[in-house]
Image (cartoon, rainbow, N blue to C red):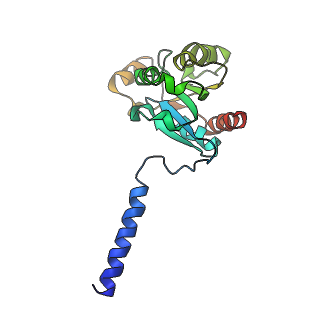
Amino acid sequence: MDKRQFFKTGFMGIGALLVSSKLKALEFYPTSPVKKWAVVYSTWCGSSRDAGVWISEGMDGIADVFDVRENPDLSKYENLVIGGSIRSGKVSNQMQEFLAQNNSALKGRVRGLFAVCGNMMQPVGPEQTKTLIDNHLAKLCDTDNVLSKVFLGRITYGLMDKDSRQMMEGFDMPEYDNLKRADCMAFGKEILSNA
């Protein structure tokens, strides 16, 4: 093997190793050697995905972030933040099923709960927290007395399934975006500081 071929082959091999380690989604977040965190969300239009990523950013990026449709293995995580987008007062069926199937993995590990809802573009108050978190999500997670937050969401018609889009357009609802990165990051910081 000549010198040129040797270097070419070596660089290709190193490049292949570097690329393969970067293929996992959201694995670029640094992890803490002391605490293992995960944020698990369900979403319809991407609002809760963004909220989950921003919550992790507020926690200095120590949490892996998973869409519930990935069916993540929670056994390696000591601390969990659970949340999702709300329709008709509930998180998605996938989230409800996931929480029921993983109930034992949640015991004593849930450190925060969040919900993302449109709330008819009105400010969120204690009533939404009680309805969406205390009376719904906390019960699904079989937990109470953890930090929780309800964020205003957004509507992006291009990301909705046909039936949901028709329903929202029937309400004459315009597209809007009330989800704030700073609010989500502040919630992440609060969770981390209370852990």
Q: Where is residue 76 in the image (x, y as percent from the top left)?
A: 51, 38
Task: From the viewer's side, name the closer residue of 48 and 27.
Answer: 27
Q: As drawn, is 142 to the left or to the right of 127? A: left
144 relative to 174 in the view: left or right = right
Name the quadrant of the C terminus. Answer: top right
Query: Residue 149 is drawn in which quadrant?
Result: top right
Q: Give the residue drawn at x 39%, y 63%.
A: 17
Q: Which residue lies furthest to the left in this view?
A: 1
Give the residue displayed 57% in from the left and 31% down from the top. Answer: 81
Q: Residue furthest toward the right?
A: 193
Q: Position of residue 4 (x, y in %)?
A: 32, 84
The residue shown at (41%, 30%) is 157
The number of discs equals 0
In the image, 47 versus 194, the foreground residue is 194
* Above or below for 35 versus 71: below
Residue at point 39%, 18% (across, down) = 167
Which quadrant of the rendered structure holds the N terminus? Answer: bottom left
Regarding residue 105, the answer to whether it shows in the image is yes
Q: In this view, does 15 lie to the left or right of 150?
A: left
Residue 47 visible within the image? no
Q: Quadrant of residue 37?
A: top right
From the viewer's side, name the closer residue of 168 and 105. 105
Front residue (pair 68, 105):
105
**Relative image position of residue 55 (x, y in whole percent):** 60, 38
